[in-house]
Image: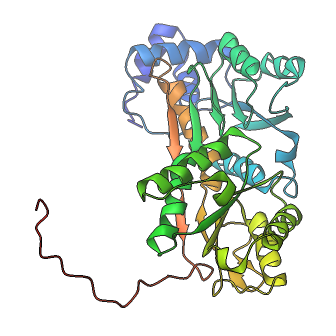
Amino acid sequence: MDKKLKITEIAARTQLSISTVSRVLAGKANTSQRAREQVMACARELGVFQGMAAGRLLLNSIVVFAPQRAFDERSDIFYYRVIQGISKAVAAHDVRLRFCALEENDSDTNAFLSRMNEKETEAALLLGIDDPHIHDLVVDIGKPCVLINCRDQKMRLPVVAPDHALIGAFAASYLFDMGHKSVMNLLCLRRYTMELRLAGIRDAWDAHNLPFSPADNLLIAENFSAAESERIVAQWLDGLPASCLPSALLVGGDFMASGAVSALQKAGLRVPQDISVMSIDGFNLAVIQDVSLTAVHVPRDTLGEEAVHVLQQRLIRPEAPVGTLLLNGSLAVRDSVRRIRPGKRPASVQHDGLYG
């Protein structure tokens, strides 16, 4: 931040003391709401925030709305770690975080309005809240808000989310690049984000000129638990001729992969010698049944931090265009996926040219 922040000029224009202006621009809590609004408006008019980096947060109280399971590591470790990322991002600043549980859909409108209309609530983060009515209320209230791993269908609110479609396509493409042409997918499709991953997986099939058939290439689980996935994979194996066993299994989460590996081993199959297993997650269970798990990491731990940075930019430039920040995944190569080497036969010689 430029040390010459025109503090004197802002103080003169707003009739506030230099110390008050300085405290507001430093994000301190011991200033009145009226003083903050005056200083912020004047600072924007003078172009103080142009090109400004994140620096100190220009607010002191944020409410995080999320499903109840997000506040319990054992119930939803993904969302729990996102919230930890939010806490980490504001730890160095004079910011108070408050939390409110809401259902993903059919949310408690009164609970939401009660928190949002509290005087101390300056901004909000909505984690995994899909209710369009809540999104409408956010816009009507007018306080800064960023959505995390959800979307505003009317494109009015900024969003930070994993690029689910690209992550799905990348994971499937990795298996194809390793030589696997027969792949079964085990996914839980309870939310549109998982549907996006499936769309990306199907895009990878198309890009590699392979036909995708839900009957032949997709197993659907009701949840992300190991027990559910073990049951589904065991049932699938019971009805599958040995000659039809695919060379790889792409699974939509680490706990699901744990159940899948357990079912495979109980059926006498070795991972990866008989069948490779890959996960889209890779944080929770790096090693399953003594098998180190190859996975595409979903950017779980950085979602909350990036959302706080986007919120800061909305405060600095409230007139800026609203968009969606999609975060890439990252590949963790371990031992659960083997390379299928092409045959040793020499390539046939073609004497004819490409066009005759």
Residue at image location 50% in from the left, 24% down from the top: 322
Tell me residue 181's x, y (percent): 51, 69
Residue at image position (88%, 41%) is: 68
- Residue 119, image quadrant: top right
Question: Where is 61 relative to 274, above or below?
Answer: above
Residue 11 located left or right of residue 280: left
- Of residue 41 and residue 351, the one placed in the foreground of this image is 351
Which quarter of the rendered picture does the C terminus lie within? bottom left
Left or right, 228 with respect to 257, comes to right
Residue 90 visible? The answer is: no
Q: Residue 102, percent across and down?
A: 85, 31
Residue 297 makes an appearance in the image: yes
Total marks in image: 0
**Image point (67%, 46%), residue name:** 194
Residue 88, x across and y down, in percent: 67, 51
Q: Judge left or right: residue 86 versus residue 223.
A: left
Camera-nearest residue between 118 and 20 = 118
